[in-house]
Each structure stands twice: as structure tokens, then as C-alpha cells.
Amino acid sequence: MGEIMTTIKHVAEYTGLSIGTISNFVNGKPTRKNNAEKIRAAIEKLDYIPNLAGKYLRKGKTKTIGILANKLESHFISRSCVVIEKMLSEHGYNVIFCTSNDDLELEKEKLTYLASSNVDAIILLPVSYIETDISSVSHIPTLLISTALENKMCNAVVFDDFESSYNATKYLYNCGHERIAILHGKKGNTPTTRIDGYKKALVECNLAFNEEYVSYGDFEDYKAEQETKRLFSIENPPTAVLVVSNEMLIGFLLGLKAKKKQVPEDVSYITFDYDNYYDLLSYSPTYVKQSKYNFGVTVYEILVDMMNNPDCNKEPQIRYVNTSLMIGETVKDLNSKEIKNVTISKF
């Protein structure tokens, strides 16, 4: 025979207090000091665990948030989720964490699972900004992070990728670079926001857009290495490259090594976000800083607003989190005279 679970009735009998008094204490309601001391001692002695699930369900809330990520290998995703989970925990929320492994069908299954788990809200890092389907959880506040859906079906919190790429490209131009390439993620499956910012900067700097300078590294080291080798095999290779993710930076550097290119003597680059392995490099990279803390705070604030104010779900909005450009040693100034007169927007 298994152990008998301690109930609130057992605590009442042990203390000689009413079930109502015990319930008030467990639910955080005012309780006389001597009664509270008796209840605490009884809970510890009897190893009583309050039925919080029943409490939350009676209120229509479970204080549980579902997080569904498209993959865990990404440093940005894993670190962002850690910050967000910590912030939710500090405010009394439990978290159910799932991953879809970049699989649309699995993503649907996991969304259904979270809905059946009675979560109060869902934080989603989608597999595709075009094909991801959230119709099965339309009755649950769902917040996208990292990217927004093309049809803008729900609220989203993202870094201002357009402005980041735009400013980084202009910085390269101000340092005398006119052959500027971009190493992007997956073609057709991720937003082109960073490419759009790159293109706008080229237009404002009177530089022609060259399709040969656009590469897709699929957020993978091997593909990034191959694309880098291709970039530096064309007739007029770039003098600078905007690497839109530090997940591809190692592949990019391996590609440069294979082509016998030195940084920044032969090639300049700007990447996105900081990683610990930067300390192993012989120089400090110039990179776009994305604050995980600011991102986590924004996600929490928007999520709470969505849960408390259903009206904010009717007209989805995209909240942009600002970034900043951290100047390192990977951009060579090619100007032999005063920097060209081009205004760079401030982050």
C-alpha cells in the first residue's frame, strides 16, 4: 500500500484549527500570528503540499507559461530563454519548455500539447515566419519572439534588425568600404529585415546592389564556410562583410583562413551579438550588441499585458528592442583622407 497523502483536513486536525483558517493561510490571506505559527509547524511536520493547481484552476489561471523554441543549438535562443524563464520565475510563474527542432508538424503538436496543459500564455520562437500556424492556440495569448509572422497574426517582440543592419552597413561605408557583402541566414525561411536594412544603406551611400554579395549560410558553420569561400572566389570580392549571426562567424572565419585572408588587413567584418569565444581571437570584433536582459524585460511586460488585457490581442503589434554598435578591431579604415559626409543613425 502506498503512502497516504497529507491533506488540508489532516493539518486542521493536527492544529485544532478550522479548514477555512488553514485555507486562508495557504492562499496568502491574513491569519493571526499564533495560528500562522501553528500552521507552518504542522505543514513542516506533516509534509503537507498545498494543491496549488486546484487553487489556480478555480481562479481560471494556472500561473504557467509555455515556451516553444524552434531549436536549442542557437546561442541567442538558449540564452534569451534562460533570461525570460528567470524573469517569469521571479514573478511567480512556472514554465513548460518545449522545442520543435525546426519541424513544422512537430511545432503544431507541441502547440496542441501546451494548449491542453492549460497554460496562461505561450511564448513562441517560430519555425517559419511564413508557414508557422498558430490557429490551434488562437484562444490563448501567444507572443512571438525573435521574429514576427508575415501575416502579423499575433504580438511579437523582436530586436530592431532593420536599423541594426542599416547602421552597421553605413559604418562600413564611412570607413571607406564600397564592396560590402552580407552573410545572411536561411533563404526564404527567415525575415529579410537585415537584408532590407543593408539595401537601404547601399542606396543612401550611392552603392549598387550586387546579388553576388548576398550569401546564405543557413545559420550553420559548414554552409557559412562554403559561402565565404565563394564570396572570395568571385572577380571583385568584397572588402567587408556583414555577418548577421555569430552562429555563422566561426564558419566565416574558417572560410577566410582557407582563402588566406587576414582580418582586418584583407577583410573587415561586423557581426551580431557577443559570444565567449571572442576572447580567444587575436582582436576584438565589431558587433551589434543585443541586450538579452532588455529583451527579457520587454517580453515579460508585453506578456503580462496580453494576459491581463485581452483587447491588446485583437490588434497585434510588433515591439522593437533597440541595439547598439560596439566598435572593435575588425573594421579597417580605408580612407586616406577625411571620412565621407554620411550621417549614421544613432541606436
Image (tube, helix red, strand yellow):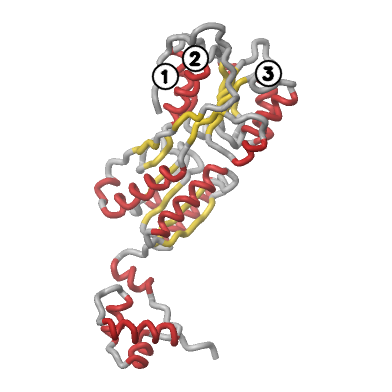
> What number is the disc on residue 54?
none
Q: In which quarter of the image is the N terminus?
A: bottom right
Where is 299 relative to 42, above or below? above
Which mark is in front, 3 or 1? Answer: 1
Q: Which amino acid type corresponds to the residue marked 2 in the rendered image?
A: Asn
Q: Quadrant of the C terminus?
A: top left
* Label 2 vs 3, first from the N-terminus: 2
Element at label 3: loop
Looking at the image, can residue 214 be seen? Answer: no
Residue 271 screen position, x and y as percent: 56, 30
Q: Which amino acid type corresponds to the residue marked 3 in the rendered image?
A: Phe
CA gap, disc 3 to disc 1? 28 Å
Is disc 1 surrounded by few (<14), some (14 to 19) or many (20+) residues within 10 Å? some
Residue wearing tag 3: 232
* Label 1 vs 2, first from the N-terminus: 2
Residue wearing tag 2: 174
Query: Is 130 left or right of 252, judged from the image as shown?
Result: left
Where is 51 relative to 3, above or below? above
Q: CB of mark 3 within 8 Å of CB of mark 1?
A: no
Q: Which residue is drawn at 48% across and 29% down?
A: 325
Where is 60 relative to 185, above or below? below
Q: Which amino acid type corresponds to the residue marked 1 in the rendered image?
A: Ile
Is disc 2 surrounded by few (<14), some (14 to 19) or many (20+) residues within 10 Å? many
Which mark is in front, 2 or 3? Answer: 2
Q: Which residue is drawn at 41% across and 43% down?
A: 294
Q: Which of 11 and 192 is in front in this view?
A: 11
